[in-house]
Amino acid sequence: AQSVAQPEDQVNVAEGNPLTVKCTYSVSGNPYLFWYVQYPNRGLQFLLKYITGDNLVKGSYGFEAEFNKSQTSFHLKKPSALVSDSALYFCAVRDTGGGNKLTFGTGTQLKVEL
Amino acid sequence: DGGITQSPKYLFRKEGQNVTLSCEQNLNHDAMYWYRQDPGQGLRLIYYSQIVNDFQKGDIAEGYSVSREKKESFPLTVTSAQKNPTAFYLCASRSALDRGPGYTFGSGTRLTVV
């Protein structure tokens, strides 16, 4: 069975500094990986995904993620954080079996401070 | 605009009651999913449906039931057998195409047992 780990419950960063939210995965076969962001009492908003191709994926709102097959990681990054980036971030992997289900990590709360 | 609509946004249930959460999509997606979100646990899959009149249990189906009589609709019933139903419930649908975000999420229903 596939799984996703987000080792940090919370990440704090100063506005203007680069941010990284970590994600590692375990899956048989080629991974389909996703990042989502959630604001309080809202649904999930898609940021980016990796299916195949370039290891550096660019997404919405200036976010990008680097796929590293040898380290089974898919860390989310942004060169310069904004206070408005403060939210809950989820990494997910798509099931390679039936149903195309998404398996999520436990989420990382990002707090960007002035 | 195309999207997923979940209703109600907030729902209060008394002990022993069944309640039904609505999920409607106008994206013409075949597959639909129900997730439960609890703090610190990420999103866990309750049920999913890949086509009309067919659905499968997810990881935490006990105490829940679903139906898929129409492509657009995938209601979730939280039964009295669900011991701890207080949570945030998210519905999603999936496009068969790999272009774009693939999955679209509703804005959620927060269920509270009173």
Image (spheres, rainbow, N blue to C red):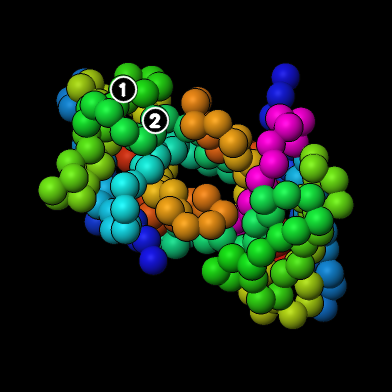
Asked where in the image residue A14 lies, by quadrant, the reply is top left
At horizontal 53% and vertical 57% (from top left) the residue drawn is A98
Q: Position of residue A90 (x, y in %)?
A: 40, 45
Asked where in the image residue A87 lies, by quadrant, the reply is top left
Q: Residues within 10 Å of mark 1 (few under 14, many from 20)?
A: some
SS assignment at label 2: strand
Q: What is the magenta range? A: B25-37
Compared to residue B15, the image places residue A103 above or below, namely above
Tag 2 subunit: A
Residue A66 located left or right of residue B66: left
Residue A89 located left or right of residue B5: left
Give residue B26's mark: none
- Front-most of residues A21 and B112: A21
Q: Quadrant of the N terminus of chain B?
A: top right
Q: Which residue is mark 1?
A: A58
Amino acid beneath label 1: Lys
Q: Position of residue B18 (x, y in %)?
A: 84, 69
- Front-most of residues A110 and A100: A100
Q: Position of residue A42 (x, y in %)?
A: 58, 39
Q: Along the polypeptide, which appears first: circle 1 or circle 2?
A: 2
Q: Quadrant of the C terminus of chain B?
A: bottom right
**CA separation in Å, label 1 and label 2:** 7 Å
Q: Are marks 1 and 2 in contact (CB under 8 Å)?
A: yes
